[in-house]
Amino acid sequence: MPSDIANDKPDTTKVWDLVIRLFHWVLVTTFIVAYLTEDDFLDLHVLAGYILGAAIMVRLLWGFVGTKHARFSDFVTSPGVAFTYLKETLSFKANRYVGHNPAGGLMIVLMLSSLTFTAITGVALYGAEEHAGPMASWFLGSSADWEGALEEAHEFLANFTLLLVAIHLIGVITESLVHKENLIRAMISGVKRST
């Protein structure tokens, strides 16, 4: 039996490996926790941020050495290709992809970038405001201007990421309807229709 056939059903294939699925749901959980605890529960906010940052590092590595559909080479395209795909989706003429479609690939790049910079500014802000964390020594004797700038950047990036999440969810729902497949279930099971 070929390794890409799942559940003994010839019309399904394993697309999302365990690393991708765990990454996705860890990212969802830690982003929600970090976003909701920003001022009131700093220790929990910082812990969620560190876990999120570690998950991103694993995902970046997995994008180069992981399974076929996890690799960036499988789904990263030019923005032009992604926007053409979006136009085709709106006219219900888009091709179906077993892995990420071009618009989904662009969204992954945008979200990973935004989350990476959110995490970096968060660690820097923690160092500047609380004099704690791996960047604390960078901000010894720094002015309040640094704290304010880092706080603004961190909040902007977190809110921008939230906007990207909303767009991503709209895309997942649209794709699920257009191609008549449950993409949320696929991100849980790892299995999609092969045709």
Image (cartoon, grey):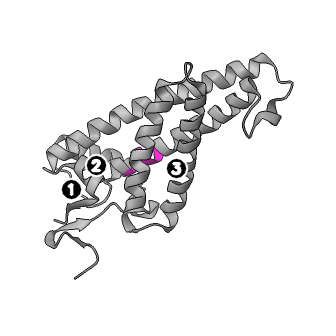
Distance between the alpha carbons at the discs numbered 2 and 3: 29 Å
Q: Position of residue 178 (x, y in %)?
A: 15, 46
Amino acid type shown at disc 1 = Asn
Question: Can you give x and y, in whole percent of width and height, for residue 123 in the image?
Answer: 66, 35
Residue furthest right in the image: 141
Q: Which residue is mark 2?
A: 85
Is 188 displayed left or right of 72 in the figure? left
Q: Nearer the viewer, residue 165 or 178?
A: 165
- Which callout, 1 or 3, points to the residue nearer the camera? 3
Secondary structure category for the residue under label 2: helix
Q: Could one spot residue 8 in this view of the protein?
A: yes
* Amino acid carrying mark 3 in the image: Ala
Q: Which circle's residue, 1 or 3, is located before the other in the chain? A: 3
128 with respect to 21 (left or right): right
Q: Residues within 10 Å of mark 2 (few under 14, many from 20)?
A: some
Q: Amino acid at mark 2?
A: Tyr
Badge number at residue 95: 1
Q: Mark 1 to mark 3: distance in Å?
A: 31 Å
Look at mark 3 in the image and give the residue it sits on.
55
The residue lying at 48 percent from left, 27 percent from top is 35
